[in-house]
Amino acid sequence: MGRYVARRLLQMIPVFLGSTALVFAMMYALPGDPVRALAGEQAVDPTQIAEMKKELGLDLPLWHQYWNYLVNLFQGDFGTQIASGRPVADIISEAFPITVRLALFAFIFTVVVGISMGVFAGLKADTLRDRGLLVLTLLLISVPSFVLGFLGQYFFAFQLGWVEPNVSLEATSSELILPAVVLGSLSLAYVARLTRTSVAENLRSDYMRTAVAKGLPRRRIVGVHLMRNSLIPVVTFLGTDLGALLGGAVVTEGIFNVKGVGYNVFDALRHREGATVVGIVTLIVVVYLVASLVVDLLYAVLDPRIRYA
Amino acid sequence: MRGAKSAKWVAGAAIIALAATACGGGDSDDSSNASKEKGKPAGYVSIDVGEPQKPLIPADTNESLGSYVIQSLFTQLLDFDADGNIVYTNAESVKSTDNKTWTVKLKSGWKFHDGTPVTSESYIKAWNWYANSKNAQQNAFWFEDIKGYADVHPEKGDPKGTEMSGLKAVDDTTFTIELNNAVPYYEYKLGYTTFAPLPEVFYKDTKAFGQAPVGNGPYIFEKWDHKKLIQVKANPDYQGPNKAKNKGVLFKNYATVEAAYQDLLSGNLDMIRQVGPKDLPKYKTDLGDRAIDEPYAAIQSIVPTFYSKTFKDIDPKVLQGLSMGIDRDTITKTVLNGTRKPATSFTPPGVAGNQDLGTDVFKFDAAKAKQLVTEGGGVPDNKIWIQYNADGGHKEWVTAVCESIRNSTGVDCVPDAKPDFQTDLEARDNDQVKSMYRGGWVADYPVNVNFMRELYGTTAEANNGRFSDKEVDAAFKKGDNAKTLDESIKAYQDAEKLLLEKMPAIPLWEYKTNGGYSKAVDNVTIDFHGDYNITEVTVNK
């Protein structure tokens, strides 16, 4: 087990290098010059632009820029934004906590509500309540999140007055609930459907029949025997979903005016702030890697037949 | 039973987390009842002004978000009223007998926010610093009229000196500006935000200053929560005519215009600068009297690139024809939801010298349009492109303009989208525009000169269409050499008539500010830039 974890951690290094290099190259390949764009439609002075680029190291070849970036990164320096001159580390440390909270709420919502809905429907497959769930999840999957966001805003903020339409600067936990529900509802639908199918399938398996025949209480049959096996595909999905929640919050953060990762990535992309984009994406990559490691380790807990050397 | 235990633990943790958030919810709901807009001190007003792109240094800011904040913190020599007339702020007077040497007299007793006096030296030293190419200020070129500019900002290499010979202090409150050439309208240029003075503290640490500026304006800097808000408070000792009538301002950053609009409706924001397309059809019903719909001094045009295959050596008649083939009335009403007003000349109203050209070149007439294009010999391959940036909400109207041109003149017109403004600008700078690009220009100073000389002069830096015409250059020169401001404006009015024959661009429409304000504030007006006069806004009790 320990060796397995160590090996997995070592594997993260090439993935980390590869993904940062890729994002770096992609930012480089994008047309549009961030330094030139500062001037907008006004006239520009080419020597001045050249001077600024030289100062920022943007005149170097791509490999050299990437090398400089890595060297700085290992010294804990995420680089500096071109326009504002602020350290990227500041931007990340402001943006991440709020998105992590948002993603965590969304994640908890997905897990709790999604799995319960799935079990609820899966235990009585092909009944009215199962069909009802299928229709509901189909709706959630097919409605784009911005529609859901605006609808939520309209009903809960303007019609019912339960919440403010936007998340304020403090971003209190209560304000984050509505955006989190909107953000989590797509994965919720997938989790519910996965659980439902898995549960419905495992209900018919031999070990379930054995458990029932042994006369075990129903709570134990469902809670331990059934759930353990049914949750494996769900956990796989949830693991990758956590990373997606972090990165995919662009639309939701935009609608509810949350100043998190999604908003900052979008903003940085628009202004071609390469260092900011690479920095944030790198952290999301790390979250992904860690989440998938945790998922793999959870398999062993759920199914003791899976063992790691 | 390891599995069962873990599962229980996970469920337990989730329940605790939910319970914790529920508690948090209850608490903050109570506090929000006390004051509607969270974190806003009493008497302050709030407006959606996003994060300035750059640190807050007057000569390094030329986008509207940053200049909003700069204008609140700094006061230049003079400013303009809603009609574009000069109002002296920090200057007592600005005078010249020959339009070449200008004498500035400052009002005495003015102080920066740190208590140091505003003197002639505050201006001279700041301008020299701004102009110096070493300091790489975005707006350095604004000082190029001043004698000695080439010493501090040579075209190549390091500057020879640190001072422009044209700036001289006479005494503490008087200084002279000597220009390279006579510029009759130079006084107007001085109203641009770039000409702000700087206190001594600036030179000690320019970086720190950019994050917490010390100005001489109606407001004092309080704090800057990056990407969230900038807060300024009213300056009680301010002596200018534009003293703040509120206690302070929150410049709040919103991720989208829609989000800002939602906050305006729910009372969490006092003023919105621009209503988004989604809410435009209903914002007047939502806001009633508090909706703002006013034109300002800016114009949108489509600009032919005279190096392109399409428009090289083009007969202006073709361009006039294309212009007449655009149904401006219908497009502004429908596609643009009435947020623009069809253009009638190369200059917008609100600038001195704006005139009615008395022409039908800007009026829709399909038959005449087709006739003119044919007479002019048409365009190669009978096809034109209009380049625009897809990130700025231009797609709809460019498509409509193309449709209109195609239907009326038979010339095939294709919208040429660039993914964003950067890419669009790059193509313009490198002379890679296929045939036309979307141009927009907001007045830097409210004189008609600003909409011609800066855009269509052969050597003008913002002339990305590479329009070059000796007669037009001569006409501009005549205006620049005029003895008085009035004569200069008049000469440029003549030049504008000449432009109509040469067609360096096809003006489409004038911009309007479509904003609004909440019940909490009153006296909301806009200036010639289309910006709110923030100092005038009062808070309702």
Image (cartoon, rainbow, N blue to C red):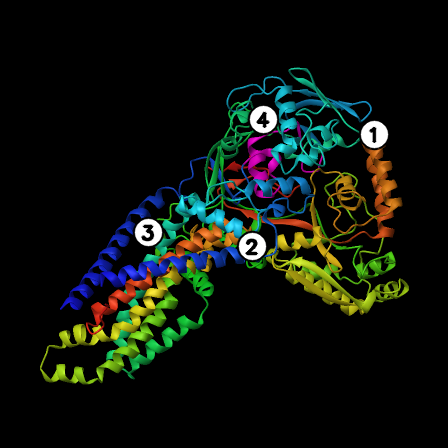
Q: Chain of mark 3?
A: A
Residue at which label 3 appears? A173
Residues indicated by labels 2 and 3 sit on the same polypeptide chain: yes
Left or right of residue A238: residue B107 = right
Image height check: is A98 above or below B35? Answer: below
Residue at which label 1 appears? B484
Please say if the residues under marks 2 and 1 sit with CB atoms less than 8 Å apart.
no
Residue at which label 4 appears? B198
Residues indicated by labels 4 and 2 sit on the same polypeptide chain: no
- Under circle 1, the secondary element is loop
Residues indicated by labels 4 and 3 sit on the same polypeptide chain: no
* Location of the N terminus of chain B (image quadrant): bottom left
Magenta-colored span: B56-85
Looking at the rendered structure, the kind of residue marked 2 is Tyr
Please say if the residues under marks 4 and 2 sit with CB atoms less than 8 Å apart.
no
Q: Chain of mark 4?
A: B
Please say if the residues under marks 2 and 3 sit with CB atoms less than 8 Å apart.
no
Q: Nearer the viewer, mark 4 or mark 3?
A: 4
Residue A28 tag number:
2
Residue placed furthest toward the left: A215
- Residue B536: x %, y % from top left: 57, 35
Tell me the residue at 18%/85% (across/down). A206
- Under circle 3, the secondary element is helix
Q: Chain of mark 1?
A: B
